[in-house]
Image (spheres, rainbow, N blue to C red):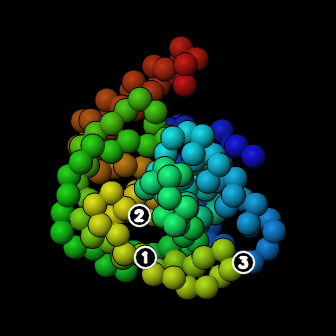
Amino acid sequence: MTYPIVKLGDPVLETPAEDVAEFGNAELDQLIEDMFESMYAARGVGLAAPQIGIAKRIAVIDTSVGEDAGQKLVLINPEIVSTSGRQTGEEGCLSIPGFREAVSRPNKVTVRARNAKGETIEVTGEDLLARALMHETDHLNGKLYITHVSALKRDLIRRKVRKLQKAGEW
């Protein structure tokens, strides 16, 4: 099932998500499958559960955008273990469509999380994968990428979104 993507303005996006306590069940497996389907339909490389209105600490990432099944990642209750280096690049978000800004992030990131079975996993990524790991973990902590841009740019985006909301286009 493809879920609609929740957009900026919905409180679920700016509220820390709840830890997942139960693993290895059909409900969780279905949610993960639906998250990948929703992410691919929206042409994204990552999706956090709050982006589909579910306040749980679950994120899916596939930097190959469905081209390489071996790159599919499921991160449940992820925590950033270490970061190093620096990269600055244009970043967007499925929940803020039509907007992109330059964001500085670590160039290498290690995350500890659980998989769908509840097993502890560690994932280290560089470049785009590092950016995706940080971006999706931010979502689970109630942060959007616009928190990493200047207050002026952030306010400008929020004003434009309010205008679109008033016009019924958001």
Farthest bottom residue? 120
How far apart in space, not on screen, are marks 2 and 3 (Cα)? 21 Å
Q: Which of label 2 and label 1 is nearer to you? A: 1
The answer to which quarter of the image holds residue 152 is: top left
The answer to which quarter of the image holds residue 100 is: top left
Taking the image as shown, residue 2 lies to the left or right of residue 79, namely right
Q: Is mark 3 on a helix, strand or loop?
A: loop
Q: In x, y percent, where is residue 163?
A: 45, 19
Residue under label 1: 123
How far apart in space, not on screen, are marks 2 and 1 (Cα)? 9 Å
How far apart in space, not on screen, are marks 3 and 1 (Cα)? 19 Å
Residue type at numbered disc 3: Phe
Query: Is the residue marked by circle 1 packed among few (<14), some (14-19), or many (20+) residues within 10 Å?
Result: some
Which of the marked residues, 3 or 1, is nearer the chain's N terminus? 3
Residue under label 2: 133
Dot label at residue 23: 3
The answer to which quarter of the image holds residue 106 is: bottom left
Query: Is the residue marked by circle 2 packed among few (<14), some (14-19), or many (20+) residues within 10 Å?
Result: many
Taking the image as shown, residue 90 lies to the left or right of residue 35, namely left
Residue type at numbered disc 2: Leu
